[in-house]
């Protein structure tokens, strides 16, 4: 792992010969985006690393703003004979743990999975027995590995299965796993996803979190305990509940607008949490109108109204707010907002509220 | 009605907690027969000077005759609580708790297959049957009304919105089931649709799906092959980007099949009445039921 051009030069010198420099970001599709390059000499390695470090790399998985390249990986350039794929994940449709292998690894694995699913090999793992040696052998032989590589492949499979189970992963993937020109089996790249719900019991993994690879507003939201995802449009929304939040974005889109964000404050947020969530929403400079869509249950409507009043009174907010609420303490909420004399429009009807939010954003 | 009715005797695991106390009170107000509570270490007490509290589910079941359990215990202890209820022979377990690790949920699936327990949730709003006067969950009771529409959903507040629309159209509900927002829920659309199909009181079913997984496609297959009752469906998340988790752990587009548009296509092809505008569900359900007569 390299953080400066000088370190890259030194690493390339130690490795000797051709090296590959790979941008380390939390997103795939790096090769096509120019994040993976080959260098013939240590000087060239330093040059490439220097060009990549400190920039933002945009791939089809990162969103338009891209992700910062703070580290690069420098490794020996391997003469590749063949690219393979290995992965462990939970298959939600069969509700089983599955080891996946394919003879057709590399950057096109997702296309292959849709176009020729027969080339994706699977072994389901019984949680009582765990992944068994015979299952790894079946996969290794069906991947047509040369005899001497079968043993290495079975060891790699057993290893990634153990990692998955011990660290509560949601995905462990080696892509590509390559056979080199001189017949060796090597893992050239790897991706590991952890189950957020299991992080409390893996403090070591939680500490690996690299916030620079996440949207700063999303990081802030997770700190205050709400779910925020930047979408990129100009109609902001704040909702309680993930399903209703998605449905609210869908309504904005149906009304001809583009949602700026997904924002779910959850079922039992406090006034302070809702206020902080509103501040996050307003931090996005693209937001031109904001729609509050709340079905009051445990989170009462008056709590949301007070939070809104608090935020709109502490600063000058140009963004017009459309409020649509239903459920617990609706009357109290209306009273609070009416007396506040703020730039807020009430609309009880869902479709009309969506249309107003979209019109005001134009 | 399905799963719960006036004969359901509910025990509440974690009853002495603050949230559990609040929601248990609301359940009792709705008419739910809460016969026992379980909090290890607090056996012998009476919750709110009324409901007997036991140290274990087995003991609670023996002494109170409970046949269903509503679980509110915090995430680190919820796996244990669900297995305890199943091992004690409780037939219906509703788990409200969220943030249970996926591997624990996978282990639950394996274990529950060897029992006769139905698990609803985790990370769900629960079950409510207005005609059965039974609420095992956290949904606001007052928006519901007894009637003939079954509701099954992966989300919480979105379901309340839909139920409010139905009630506004004077369409009551037979039972509403919230499956929960996790990738490995205890129950699924097919299991609940099967029960609604067999239930004489249910005349139509509203299905609320969301992005992630393929459970809506499995539902579509069941609807096409085995469902004679009309299904009205909406799948949330048409506007969600791929690869981003939308609040629920299960709501993430990982392949084309997990997109809302694909799911709605499958459901429509199977004969369900599908809308991409959830504000229309109440109205559409009324139309569908009107054309049946």
Image: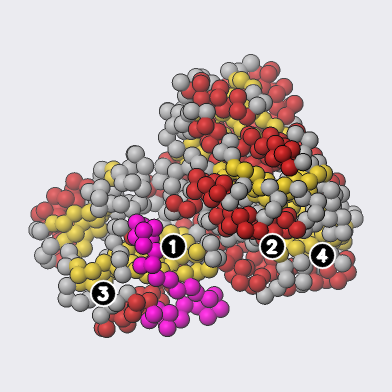
Question: For mark 1, what is the residue?
Answer: A171
Report the residue at 26% width, 69% height from top: A178
Q: Which residues are magenta?
A: A110-138
Is A125 in the magenta? yes
| Tag of residue B119 | 2
The answer to whether residue A282 is seen in the rendering is no
Q: Position of residue B174 (x, y in %)?
A: 78, 48
Report the residue at 56% width, 38% height from top: B276
Check whether the beta carbons of the residues at disc 1 and disc 4 lie within 8 A of each other: no
Mark toward the start of the polypeptide (2 vs 4): 4
Label 1 vs label 2: CA separation? 26 Å
Question: For mark 3, what is the residue?
Answer: A185
Q: Nearer the viewer, mark 1 or mark 2?
A: 2
Q: Residue furthest right?
A: B50
Label 2 vs label 4: CA separation? 13 Å
Question: For mark 4, what is the residue?
Answer: B67
Crowd tier of the residue under label 2, counting other residues whose Cα lies within 10 Å: few below 14, some 14–19, many 20 or above? many
């Amino acid at each position: 792992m390299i953080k400066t051009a000088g370190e890259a030069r030194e690493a390339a010198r130690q490795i000797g010969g051709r090296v590959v420099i790979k941008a380390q970001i939390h997103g795939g599709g790096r090769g096509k985006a120019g994040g993976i390059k080959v260098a013939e000499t240590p000087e060239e390695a330093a040059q490439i690393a220097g060009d990549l470090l400190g920039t933002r790399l945009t791939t089809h998985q990162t969103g338009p703003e891209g992700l910062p390249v703070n580290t690069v990986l420098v490794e020996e350039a391997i003469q590749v004979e063949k690219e393979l794929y290995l992965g462990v994940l939970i298959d939600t449709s069969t509700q089983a743990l599955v080891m996946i292998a394919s003879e057709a690894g590399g950057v096109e694995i997702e296309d292959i999975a849709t176009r020729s699913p027969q080339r994706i090999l699977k072994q389901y793992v019984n949680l009582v027995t765990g992944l068994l040696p015979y299952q790894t052998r079946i996969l290794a032989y069906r991947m047509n590995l040369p005899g001497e590589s079968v043993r290495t492949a079975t060891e790699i499979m057993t290893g990634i299965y153990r990692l998955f189970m011990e660290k509560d992963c949601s995905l462990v993937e080696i892509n590509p796993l390559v056979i080199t020109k001189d017949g060796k089996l090597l893992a050239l790249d790897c991706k590991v996803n952890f189950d957020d719900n299991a992080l409390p019991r893996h403090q070591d993994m939680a500490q690996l979190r690299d916030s620079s690879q996440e949207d700063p507003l999303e990081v802030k939201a997770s700190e205050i305990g709400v779910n925020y995802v930047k979408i990129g449009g100009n109609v902001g929304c704040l909702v309680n509940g993930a399903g209703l939040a998605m449905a609210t974005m869908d309504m904005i889109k149906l009304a001809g607008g583009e949602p700026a964000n997904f924002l779910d404050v959850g079922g039992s947020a406090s006034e302070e949490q809702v206020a902080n969530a509103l501040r996050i929403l307003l931090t996005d400079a693209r937001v031109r109108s904001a729609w509050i869509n709340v079905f009051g249950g445990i989170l009462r409507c008056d709590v949301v109204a007070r939070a809104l009043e608090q935020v709109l009174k502490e600063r000058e907010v140009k963004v017009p707010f459309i409020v649509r609420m239903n459920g617990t303490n609706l009357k109290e909420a209306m009273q609070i907002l009416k007396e506040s004399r703020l730039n807020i429009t009430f609309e009880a009807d869902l479709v009309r509220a969506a249309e107003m939010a979209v019109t005001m954003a134009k | 009605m399905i799963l719960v009715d006036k004969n359901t005797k509910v025990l509440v695991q974690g009853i002495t907690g603050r949230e559990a106390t609040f929601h248990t009170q609301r359940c009792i107000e709705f008419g739910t027969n809460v016969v026992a509570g379980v909090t290890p270490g607090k056996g012998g007490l009476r919750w709110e000077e009324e409901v007997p509290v036991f140290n274990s589910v087995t003991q609670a079941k023996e002494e109170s005759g409970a046949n269903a359990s509503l679980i509110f215990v915090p995430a680190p202890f919820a796996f244990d609580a669900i297995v305890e209820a199943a091992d004690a022979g409780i037939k219906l377990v509703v788990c409200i708790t969220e943030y249970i690790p996926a591997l624990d949920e996978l282990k639950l699936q394996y274990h529950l297959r060897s029992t006769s327990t139905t698990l609803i949730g985790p990370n769900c709003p629960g079950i409510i049957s207005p005609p059965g006067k039974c609420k095992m969950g956290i949904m606001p009771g007052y928006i519901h009304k007894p009637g003939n529409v079954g509701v099954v959903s992966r989300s919480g507040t979105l379901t309340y919105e839909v139920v409010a629309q139905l009630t506004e159209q004077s369409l009551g509900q037979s039972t509403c089931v919230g499956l929960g927002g996790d990738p490995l829920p205890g129950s699924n659309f097919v299991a609940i649709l099967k029960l609604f199909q067999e239930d004489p009181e249910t005349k139509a079913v509203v299905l609320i799906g969301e992005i992630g997984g393929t459970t809506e496609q499995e539902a579509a297959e069941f609807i096409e092959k085995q469902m004679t009752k009309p299904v009205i469906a909406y799948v949330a998340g048409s506007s969600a980007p791929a690869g981003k988790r939308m609040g629920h752990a299960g709501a993430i587009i990982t392949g084309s099949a997990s997109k809302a548009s694909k799911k709605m296509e499958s459901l429509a092809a199977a004969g369900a009445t599908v809308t991409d505008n959830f504000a229309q569900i109440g109205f559409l359900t009324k139309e569908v039921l009107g054309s049946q007569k």
